[in-house]
Image: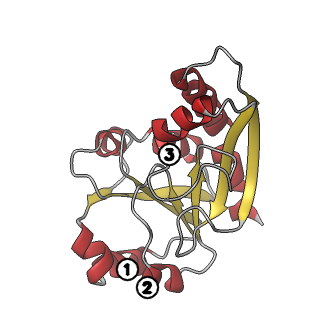
Amino acid sequence: MKRIVIFASGSGTNAENLIKFFHNRENISVIQVFTNNPHAKVLDRAKKLKVSALSFNKIAFTETNDILNALKSIQPDLIVLAGFLWKFPKHILEKFPNKVINIHPALLPKYGGKGMYGMYVHEAIVKNNEKETGITIHFVNEHYDEGAIIFQAKCKVNVSDSAQDVANKIHKLEMEHFPKVVEKLLNE
């Protein structure tokens, strides 16, 4: 059985999509959700879908081995960041080399880096009159959005599109592709 752990900071739509996609699979399962936000909607989604969830603070994540030890105890085959806003600490990345991936709502290397997430990305896309955008699934390293790219999917940006229109297109790409790319990675 391949084991997935998800880190999320917000509403958890990607986390829910992954949990549902792998529900009742014999070979892959989402076993834990971690969040840095004790009020994140992802906690409600995980509870509703009967997946264990844990909220933690910055000290537990970056200054102690609390989260590292929690991860080591459950031995995930893949750690999936799905709307997780903190930079992943080096001490965790070193213990799980090439096992931490992220989804970003733009075609990296464009519109990546600290502070570039969610609507900030979509607003920048519209403001800069981009003709296309998309999603990037990439390995996580010690820098924001700079790990090796695993997969990208594109969509057109129309002149009349608002940032919300772009967000809706990106959400569709995420729902369609993210679970399939995770499954492919785990089956390689």
Q: Is residue 180 above or below residue 48?
A: below
Residue 50 appears at what percent x and percent y?
36, 46
Q: Residue at x 61, y 35 (%)?
A: 125
Residue 78 appears at what percent x and percent y?
57, 67
Q: How many residues crowd mark 2 within 10 Å: few (<14), some (14–19), many (20+)?
A: some
Please tell me whether mark 3 or mark 2 is closer to you in this view: 2
Name the residue type under label 3: Ile
Quadrant containing the N terminus in the rendered view: bottom right
- Residue with the mark numbered 2: 91
The answer to whether marks 1 and 3 mark residues whose Cβ atoms lie closer than 8 Å is: no
Q: Foreground residue, 137 or 146?
A: 146
Q: Looking at this view, name the residue that lies furthest to the top.
A: 160
Q: How is the image coloured?
A: secondary structure
Name the residue type under label 1: Leu
Residue 123 appears at what percent x and percent y?
52, 32
Name the residue type under label 2: His
The answer to whether marks 1 and 2 mark residues whose Cβ atoms lie closer than 8 Å is: yes
Q: Is residue 161 above or below residue 167?
A: above
Please tell me whether mark 1 or mark 3 is closer to you in this view: 1
Instruction: Identify the disc placed on residue 127.
Output: none
The answer to whether marks 3 and 2 mark residues whose Cβ atoms lie closer than 8 Å is: no
Kindly report the distance in space between the C-alpha atoms of the residues bearing marks 3 and 2. Answer: 27 Å
Circle nearer the N terminus (1, 3): 3
- Residue with the mark numbered 1: 68
Question: The residue tagged with tag 1: helix, strand or loop?
Answer: helix
Question: The residue tagged with tag 3: helix, strand or loop?
Answer: helix
- Residue with the mark numbered 3: 19
Please tell me whether mark 1 or mark 2 is closer to you in this view: 2
Kindly report the distance in space between the C-alpha atoms of the residues bearing marks 1 and 3. Answer: 22 Å
Q: Residue at x 27, y 83 (%)?
A: 64
